[in-house]
Image (spheres, grey):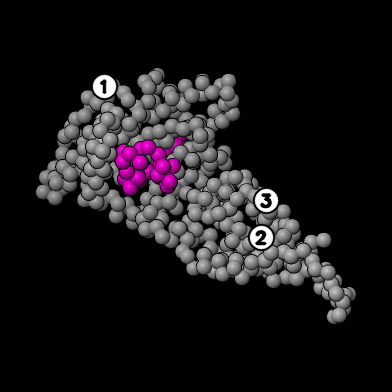
Amino acid sequence: MYVSAVDPDLLRGFAAELKAFHIASGEPSYAVLSRLADKHGESLSPASISDLLAGRRLTSSTIALAFVRNVLRYRGNHDDTAHEAEVDRWLERWTRVRNSTNPASLAGDAAAGPTAATPPLPVELDFTSIEESTVTRHRRRPPIAALLPPGVRIFHAMLDEALSAKDPRGRRWSEAKWGCYAFYDFDGEPIYVGQTNEGLRVRVRRHLSNQRTDAVAMRVLDVMEVAELELWPLWELEDAGRPDHREAQKLLGRVECTVYRNALEQNSIGMLLNTHIPPSSEPVTLPESARFPLVDPTVREMRGAPDVRIARCAETLARLAGVVAERGGVSASLRRVMVVQAARLTRLTAARHAYAAGELPPEPNLVDIGYLRAAGRD
């Protein structure tokens, strides 16, 4: 019969506390936590989580702390420095269980006497020294957030705050599966519009945190130029099943087209950085939206400085041109974005020159690329 080396009551209590912590945090699936851990360079399989919460044996502290960190990340805060105190508390609980002794094993030793030949019990492999040295080594390594430049860290923290914000009914704006979104630059002008039916939170993060979308990879969208975010959740489509999917997709397309048209009117050059232009449709009444800042005054002062923006815009245009030159046969829509980016650069440099020379700001029609609106689609 297997006999645990630690106090089973403490072990079960530790597992029960972890379960309660898991449920109180929204009870994310083991697969979700495993994927989240993988994104942060940690190993946490669904099987190891199941083993941890079962409370039959004490798993490694590495697994226990990885579980805690990724549950905290699931709550919406990806700043690991903010988790340190909570993680330390769970490490103390794990250590308390690890240092305990099973009363049953002590009683068995006493009954057997000093000279009794005790049959060997099945061995519980215990790599404590290795694990604890590993934990120590990992705890010396700074969290990912600590490696980020201050501006990026603040941007991520404010993005987390925006994606965790709730509407008057207590729903997180970003938790809607269907909806549209827009990004705004440091002048408060919209620069990119998109739609999704896989979750606003997921889609926005792919653009701004993970940077795994085509718009970012192709150098179309410069994340450093994004200063605000607006979300239009379509709550009425949350339960859209397969039979209703086509109609739901049509409504999503009409909402995106309306958001896009409104954005064109708010943009000083009348064009956005979208490679895909939504198909034309009749405008609709937009759902309630929420707009969030993604930079604080300090970051705005640094990233929003005119000369810094000019340098960044020129670099983005050069990189985009490099992509076009390397690939050659790119779509006309990507070349259209090059024109839009060049127009943005022209307006920024002209405005800065006028300010430096003590002249009046350039005329609104300094750069006219309105012809692109009628130049066809993708």
Answer whether residue 154 is magenta in the image: no
The residue sitting at 34% across, 54% down in the picture is 299
Among the two numbered marks 2 and 3 on one chain, the one whose residue lies closer to the N terminus: 3
Q: Secondary structure at mark 3?
A: helix
Q: The disc labelled 1 sits on which kind of residue?
A: Ala
The residue sitting at 52% across, 65% down in the picture is 138
Q: Which mark is residue 361?
A: none
The answer to which image quadrant residue 281 occupies is top left
Residue 108, image x, y percentages: 85, 71
The residue sitting at 49% across, 41% down in the picture is 201
Q: Secondary structure at mark 1?
A: helix
User: Which residue has dot 2 on it?
Assistant: 59
Q: The disc labelled 2 sits on which kind of residue?
A: Thr
User: Which residue has dot 3 on it?
Assistant: 50
Q: Is residue 332 left or right of residue 180?
A: left
Q: Is residue 153 above or below residue 285?
A: below
Neighbours of disc 2 within 10 Å: few (<14), some (14-19), many (20+): some
Q: Give the extent of the magenta segment.
A: 206-232
Q: CA distance from mark 3 to mark 1?
A: 57 Å
Q: Which of the pair 357/11 is nearer the observer?
A: 11
Q: Which of the pair 176/78 is nearer the observer?
A: 78
Q: Pointers 1 and 2 in contact (CB under 8 A)?
A: no
Task: Check the picture and name the quadrant holding the N terminus.
Answer: bottom right
Answer whether residue 220 is magenta in the image: yes
Q: Secondary structure at mark 2?
A: loop
Neighbours of disc 1 within 10 Å: few (<14), some (14-19), many (20+): few
- Residue lying farthest bottom? 114
Neighbours of disc 3 within 10 Å: few (<14), some (14-19), many (20+): few
Residue 159, image x, y percentages: 44, 48
